[in-house]
Image (tube, rainbow, N blue to C red):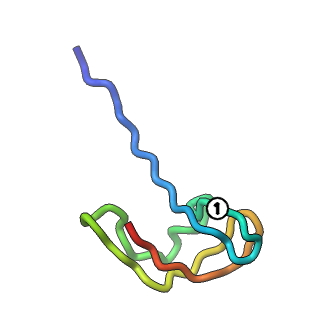
Amino acid sequence: MSNIKAMWSVELWSECPGCNEPVDLLGDPDFWDGVSFQPCENKTARTKDVTVYCPRCGHEFDVDLEY
């Protein structure tokens, strides 16, 4: 009997200060352009001052990433 597949699902939620809505920042197709960190490479990690764009309203803002 062969193993079944298990799929990872990654989300990055924040509240946009422009539209005040919760957004998955990974919904921006350009999110990974110029980003130099690897999520889940350690047990915990913090990356400060990452500039992101809200995929809903396009507002640009800075976030500190943490997991």
Q: Is residue 56 above or below residue 51?
A: above
Q: Residue furthest left?
A: 1
Q: Residue at x 73, y 70 (%)?
A: 20
On screen, residue 3 above or below 10: above
Residue at (62, 58) in percent of width and height: 27
Number of other residues with Cα within 10 Å of mark 1, as a class: few under 14, some 14 to 19, many 20 or more: some
Quadrant placement of the C terminus: bottom left
Q: Disc 1 marks which amino acid? A: Val
Count of picture labels = 1
> What residue is shown at x 40% (from left), y 76% (from top)?
36
| Secondary element at image label 1 | strand
Q: Position of residue 40 (x, y in %)?
A: 32, 61
Percent coordinates x, y for residue 43 in the rendering:
25, 64
State the residue position of label 1. Answer: 23
In front of the other: 19 or 47 = 19
Left or right of 15: which side holds 10?
left
Looking at the image, residue 47 sits to the left or right of residue 25; the answer is: left
Identify the image quadrant of the N terminus.
top left
Q: Residue at x 76, y 71 (%)?
A: 19
Q: Is residue 8 left or right of residue 21?
A: left
